[in-house]
Amino acid sequence: TAILIAVMAFLCCSEFLKMSRRSGRMPNDVIALAFAVIFPFAPLSNISDSEFFVIFALLVVCAMWYVSTPRANMGDVALTVFGPIYTSLAFSSIVIIRDAFPGWRGALLTFAVMGSIWLSDSCAYFVGSKLGKHKLAPRISPNKSVEGFWGGMVGSVVVWLIVFALGIYNINLPYAIVCGVLVDAAAVAGDLFESRIKRGVGVKDSGNLMPGHGGMLDRSDSLLFGGMTAFLLLRLGGIL
């Protein structure tokens, strides 16, 4: 799982850096991409709060690069730090969830988290295309509707209700509904955030890795925020 997430994070970060360059910035690709690969493996170490140490190392390396490179400015440094945190640290939440329970229990919970976001996207699309009349964020993502948003939330909650019904994890009914609602809201926020980045640099897709579907970041934007929110809720609720 860590290897798969590291590959996806590398591709997402690479697309983010390319978009950053379209805005006139010059982030350090080597540093950003190296840490994009490192973050997903941090949860597998025996060091407590290993992600904190990786973040600190990222800050130190960027500081050294900034001091030794006259052409670099604060915007370049900020994007070099933000790129791997946005595209990889957030993604590493999937690895943490998978590693929390051994065997099939961890795998099932991981797929439930990801599945709630995927079903939310699908329900939002179908409900929005059939019933959508009120624009959710017309200046950022004209195709999203308020009706689609609520349809997506229903899809997310359904998956979390299934998690509750299985009785495998220590999650009660009210908290399952809360998880479904908040994970969906975070996933939509992640989608809109990436759409705002693309509009800011004047591109339709983050990349062309999948013709007709855009880049890896286009396919993962909801999962970045949604997965991290799911991890935080599962940790706060004592499930992890």
Image (cartoon, rainbow, N blue to C red):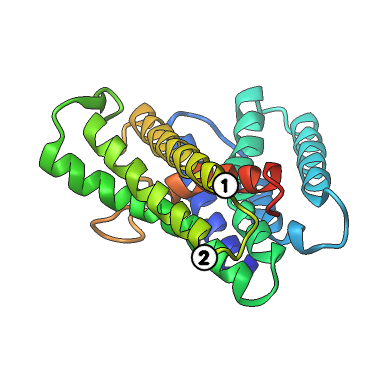
Q: Say which amino acid is labelled 1.
A: Ala
Disc 1 crowd rating (10 Å Cα; few below 14, some 14-19, many 20+) is: many
Judging from the image, what secondary structure is the residue with disc 2 in? helix
- Residue 42 image point, x, y percent: 76, 57
On the image, numbered disc 2 is attached to which residue?
166
Residue occupied by mark 1: 230
Is residue 203 positioned above or below 158 on the image? above
Earlier residue among tags 2 and 1: 2
Viewer-closest of 81 and 100: 100
Q: Secondary structure at mark 1?
A: helix
- Residue 142 visible: no
Name, please, the residue furthest toward the right.
47
Task: Place residue 191 in its image quadrant.
Answer: top left
| Crowd tier of the residue under label 2, counting other residues whose Cα lies within 10 Å: few below 14, some 14–19, many 20 or above | few
Which quarter of the rendered picture does the C terminus lie within? Answer: bottom right
* Left or right placement of residue 58 versus residue 239 in this view: right
Q: Could you say which is closer to the camera, residue 205 or residue 167?
A: 167
Q: For this view, does 54 lie left or right of residue 174?
A: right
Q: CA distance from mark 2 to mark 1?
A: 18 Å
Q: Residue at x 71, y 62 (%)?
A: 100
- Residue 178 vs residue 89: left or right? left
- Please give the name of the residue rendered at 31% of the width and 52% of the height, measured from the top-left corner: 214
Nearer the observer: mark 2 or 1; the answer is: 2
Circles 2 and 1 in contact, beta carbons < 8 Å: no
Quick one: quadrant of the N terminus?
A: bottom right
71 or 229: nearer the eye? Answer: 229
Residue 84 in which image quadrant: top right
Q: How many marks?
A: 2
